[in-house]
Structures are given as structure tokens and as C-alpha cells.
Amino acid sequence: MIEVVDFHKCYGQQVAASGISFDVQPGQVLGLIGPNGAGKTTTMRAIAGINPPSKGTLRVAEFDVQKQPLETKRRLAYIPDDPQLFTELTVAEHLAFVASAYNVSDAEKRIDSLLIQFDLRNKVNDRVGDLSRGMRQKLAICCGYIHDPQAILFDEPLTGLDPKGIRVLKESIHQRAQQGSAVVISSHLLAMVEDTVSHVLILDKGQQKFFGPVEEVKANFANGGVAVSLEEVFFQATAEVAAV
Amino acid sequence: MNPINTALRIHPAVAVLLHGQNLAVFRKTKRSFMTRRRAILSTLALAMGLLWFVNALTSVLFREPLGPERIELMVPLSLFVYAAWHVVRSAIWRPTSGIEWQPAEAEFMSLAPLPRRELIVYRIAAITNAGLLKSLFFSVLMIPDLAFWPAGFLGAFLALVAIDLFRMVVEITAWGMSDAAFFRTRIVCLGLFAVWTGYVAMLGFSDPDWLEKARSPAAFELAQEFLAAAASTSDTVFGTVVLAPFRIFTAIMLAHSLSVPVIVYSFLAMAMVWTLGKLVGKLDAYFQQEVVLREQAAYSQRLSSSIPATLVEVESQIPFEMPKIPFAFGGGGLAWRQMKAALGYFYSLVISLTVPAVLACLPIAVHRHPNDVLLNVLGALVFYSFVLLPTALKFDFRRDLDRMGVLKTLPIRPMMVVAGQLAAPVLLSIVYQMVVLLVVYLTTPVDPKLIGACIVLLFPLNVLIFAVDNLLFLLYPYRVNQEGLTVFLRTTLTFTAKGLMFGVALALIVGWTYAAVRITKFLNEAWAAHLSLHFVFALGIWCFVVVCAGFALTALRKAFVGFDLANDV
């Protein structure tokens, strides 16, 4: 569903990502982990078609992100860590715009269901500038879900969400994956996403350190046969234990 | 589907967005009256708007028509200068993106499966929206000169849209071309501009009376002389060629009725607008691809070279030096930060301040008596400081709308936050004024004490000017990079308010002149003192400016403390 082959990205002289390759199949949930500046957001934004790659191929549902951007976008949702929304528009107007852009047929029904699911029903006529950080995050998630995307990219989706919001989001991710979506989640809250992800990609300083199923990664970094947490894996893979 | 329908079709999502944004304008207006403070300020703004409108209406009703010959000359020339300015500006300050998108437009809209063409249509629709109202204003003001108002409105509207589209063409091209091509283009554009300016200057200075004309306040007559010289270049072959497209819009504006030639000209103008719109789309598509291919080629070359391509930082090799920032009761850090930002625009600032500096220095060449020179330079400096500097030096609260939360949480007294925020533009202004005064000192045998007195006077004046501008901003916050009608209306209202303040200040100065004569006489007679009238007058003005600056700073402090992040941002 999502396929990244030898992805490189440089900003001027600085290389943000170098030689990254992975794939996410329908029903899989990939956890993209790594320290700040590892290249997680760069990779996600390239898959979303926002930033073109300096080298490499990115595909979503067999469509090339660079060559067939519209086909890709129709099947994709990207929820950034700091959603940039139109502050003067209302929640309903945002959702109406997205539904129209994706040509969603039963938009009203879907929007209503999403608003109830994410506790935004009573905010539907509020302007986005008046919403809290968490509410804006929920709205961005609703915008991403309207068209039932086949591939979903979450960049730090748990930031700002209340406990109920986190639970609803995690449940919805499981549900979407079971329905056949390929999901990528980038998060620093490793304990929170540990039970959600099926695969893990570890990045550090723009380079790929590990990619594989979560059980495999835990076995790889096991300490004398004792299973380790994702957090322990993160520190070992990025060799930052000594610095902590 | 009919090809014309396809070309003019707007994606339903874009239509939904534009409709939502129009509704948002009404909601925003409604919000302007929600709280007591906002209601008072909005009423004041309305009153100011009404004042401006009545003034404009009066000028429309009572002024003499300019005459078709003058309009035929000035309108195409003004449009050309406006278009040329976009070229020169892009040649000096290369755009960082082809089309300037707001963050929400750049991210939220680009994620949607909308063809790039739809995004361009959205942008052009926004330009057209603003152009409609601007041309409405313009054509109303031009009523005495327009024989057939609808044609005047249509001509102005098409001209404004065409120039905005031309700006987009220029900016996309300047952004998208390679560094080498941009460098060559910059040389050519600036070279042509220099040649034209030099030619106009040559014509202007060929007038034997130019020295006399430079005597007028702020060299207005000389400026008019240069404008006339610039206008005379329209008769040259070069002028005839470059002004030809703009004359089409003028022909529509000056039409007497809906005649066949006017219809033909209108079609020609619309064809020009349509072509420019298509060109924007084509250039955007071309350069979007070109920039990516260039980046990929450069990266590929880099990979094949010996330079390591991976980002492996060797922390110990990265030089690090802690900047030494004065505390200054907490305001030092803020001042340092603003100054650092200002120095990032050093060359732009030098370029934009050079013209007013040269104009302010003109009295040196005109007046013989050193004190006359100084007084005229001082007057010009005050005028330009009042009108231009707050626009050129926005290194204060005005660029910190999104950082107001941070500023409010700092453990610094509000007055020190205000002082720290204003320090950079005030210091830069005084440096600019000191440079001009230094030129006066080096070229004229003026008493250095008087130069010092001027600096002492200008310092609180700068504080006052920037405090007032920041006060208006905190009471009516806006984003610096905003564009369109809102900015147009805001600028109109701000300048009306400033004009009123300037008028009141002038009236007070005149009043003080009479008072200073009596006070000086009284003091000299009562206490047998030998006070000079000039000294008493200057001291009174200085005290007045200092008191006003104090009030403005206090009001600014209060506005900062009362700034409500939930309602004002």
C-alpha cells in the first residue's frame, strides 16, 4: 500500500533523510520512531506529496507520489503534528471543504458520525481559531478520516489529546487497519503506541536503523532473552542510553 | 464539455472555501463589536472611515477634473511604474516561493486531491476579489475625470488584476530560475532601472531652477519635477513600446460611451488578463517540476562526488559561542532579539532608507545659511520618520503576534517588555537620523551643539512614533504578511488617524510659537533673564514630545497587559 524505495531528502547542504526504504501493507500499522531531527516528518511529508524527494521512489496504492499526485492524494490522509487550519473558518466549513475536495458522496452522514466519535458535535459552528490545541488535532483527524483513506499518516497524533481522545484515536486506528488501511504513526510517546503498532521503523540522523515487525525488533534488542519495551529498543537503536 | 466552461470552472471545493472565507469576513466584523473595548475601537475606526469617506467624497465633488490628456499620460505611466516595481523588487529580494501561500493554504489545501490548477484559480480568485473593491474605490475617486463611470471601473479593475497577475509571473519566474540565470536577470533588470533613473535624473537636473524647487518643504517641487521628467520619457520609443499595453486600460477608463472601440479594447484587455492567468499556471507548473529536477540533479551529483551525503554531525566540531546579551531589567534580551532580526535585513533596510535619506539631505545643496539647512533637514527627517520609518522598521510587537503568549509569560515588568520591543526600531531610526545629520555636519558649518540638540529632540520623537504604531497594532492586531482589502482599509484608517494626529501636533506647535514669545518676554522681564526665544520654543517642543512619548508608552504598556490572546489573535 505504502512503498518507499531509497528515499533521500536534502535541504540545501543538510541531508535530512538518506537511503530510507520500507513498505506498509494493508492492515499494518507502522511505528516511525527516532529522536528529534531523525527525518520522520521529512519522510511523512514526502509520502504526503508536500515535499518532493531528492532521490528515490514513493508509492501509495501503487501510484507514484511524484508522477500521479492526485491519485495518491485521493487515497491518502496526512495528519501533521501541528495542523495548519483556517482560523477564521468554522469546524463545519473545514469538513465541508474536505468532503467537497474528496467528492465524498454521503458526506453529511460521515461527518456527523466522526463529530460524535471525536466529541466535536457541540463545536461544529465554532471558528477554528477558538478551539484548543487538542480540539484542532481532533478536527484534523476528522478531516483525514472523511474519505476513508487507504493510507493514513499520523505525525505525533497524540499531542494535545485528552485521555478519552487518545483512546478513541487508538481504537479508530485499530479499526481502520482492520478495514484494510495502511497506517504510519510517528510518535515519541512510545509506551502509548506500543500496543498499536505492528511494525517499527527506527530512524536516526536521517538514516534507517531498523525496519521490521514489532516482535522481531523486540527480539533483536532483547536483553538476555528478556523481552524489552519499545522505549528500550529506541534507546539501544539510537545508542543514547549513556547520554540519558 | 465546452472548452470555455472547462477553463472557467472552479472546483466545488474551492467554491466552498471561498464562500466560507467570505462568511468569515462577516463573522469577524460581528466579533469586532462583541466586547466593550472592541466595540469602542471599532466605532472609532468606523468614524475614521466615515471621515476619510467624507473627505474623499468632498474631493470628488469639488475638485477640478484633471483633463483627459493628463490622465492619458499619468495612468499608463503609473501602471508601468507599479509593474516595474514588482520586477525591481523581485530582482533585489528574490522570492522564497513562487506563490506566497498562507500556512493553512500551503498545507491544508495542498494535501487535498486538487489539481495545482485549482490552487492557482483559488489564488487568482482572491486577487480578483480584492481588485474589485480597490477598483471600485479608485473609480469613485476618479468620478470627475470619467465620462462613463462603468467603463472607468472596468478599466481600473482589469488593470489592477493584470498587474497582480504580472506580479505573480515575475515572482514565479524569479523563484524558479536557476541561481546563475537569476543573477544574470538581476544584473539586466537593475541595470535597466539604473539607466532609466539616470536618464530621468539627467532630465530633472537639466532644469536651471532645480535648486529653487528643492527649497520647497521636503523637496516636493523637486519631486514633482522628477515625476514630470519621468512622464516625458513616455514620448520616447522605449516609453511608447512599454506603455502600449497600459494605454489599453486607459482607453477603456476614458471611454465616453459603450462604443465599438471600447468593446474591442475591453476584449483586448480581457485577453491580456486571460493570457497572464494562463501564463501564471504554465510557469508555475513548469518551475514546480524544474526546481525538483534541479534539486535531484544536484543531489545526484553530490552523491557521486567525494562529499559524504549523510548527516552525521560531529558535535565537538560545531563551533559554539554564547552571545553576550545585556539583561537591562529583562528588556535587553528582547531588544537583542529584535535587533538580530533587523540586521538580517541589513541590505534591504539600507536600500529602503537611502532614498528618504538623500531627499532629507537635499536642503544642504539649496540653502546658504547653516541654520536654515539644519532646520530644513530636521523638518524633512521628522516628516519621513513619521511616514516611512514605522513601515520600514517593523521589528517590534508587529512581527510578534504569534509570540504574544511567550512575551506575556516572561518574568519581566510589562514596561520593560515594551521598552525591549521598541528598542530596535527606535535605535535604528536614530542611527539613520544621525547619519543624515552627520552629512549636514560634514558639509555645512553648522554649530555641533545644534546637531546634538536635534538628536536629543529626535530620540523621544522616535519613541513616540513607534509607540503609537505599536499601540494601534495591539488595539487592532493583524498579521504583517496579510494582503488584500483588509490591509488596504487598515492602512487607510491608520494614515487617516496619523494625519489627524499630525494636524493636531502642527496646530499645537503654532499655538506654542505664540505662547513661547509671551513666555520668553515674561521671563526676561520678570527675572531679567537672557533667554533666547529659540531655546524656549525648542525646550517646550521637546517637553511636549517627551510627555506625549511617556503617555504613549504608558498606553502601550496597558494595551500589552490587556492583550487577550483568546480574543485578539
Image (spheres, grey):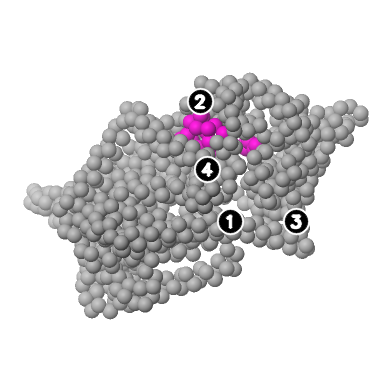
* Nearer-N-terminus badge (1/3): 1
Q: CA distance from mark 1 to mark 3?
A: 29 Å
Q: Which mark is residue B11?
A: 4
Q: Secondary structure at mark 1?
A: helix
Q: CA distance from mark 1 to mark 2?
A: 37 Å
Residue A79 drawn in magenta: yes
Q: Chain of mark 4?
A: B
Magenta segment boundaries in residue numbering = A77-99
Residue at the (58%, 63%) spot, across then down: B177
Circle 1 Cα neighbour tier, 10 Å, few/some/many (<14 / 14–19 / ≥20): some
Q: In which image quadrant can residue B309 be found?
A: bottom right
Q: CA distance from mark 2 to mark 3?
A: 48 Å
Circle 4 Cα neighbour tier, 10 Å, few/some/many (<14 / 14–19 / ≥20): some
Q: Secondary structure at mark 2?
A: loop
Residue at numbered disc 3: B309
Q: Amino acid at mark 1?
A: Ala
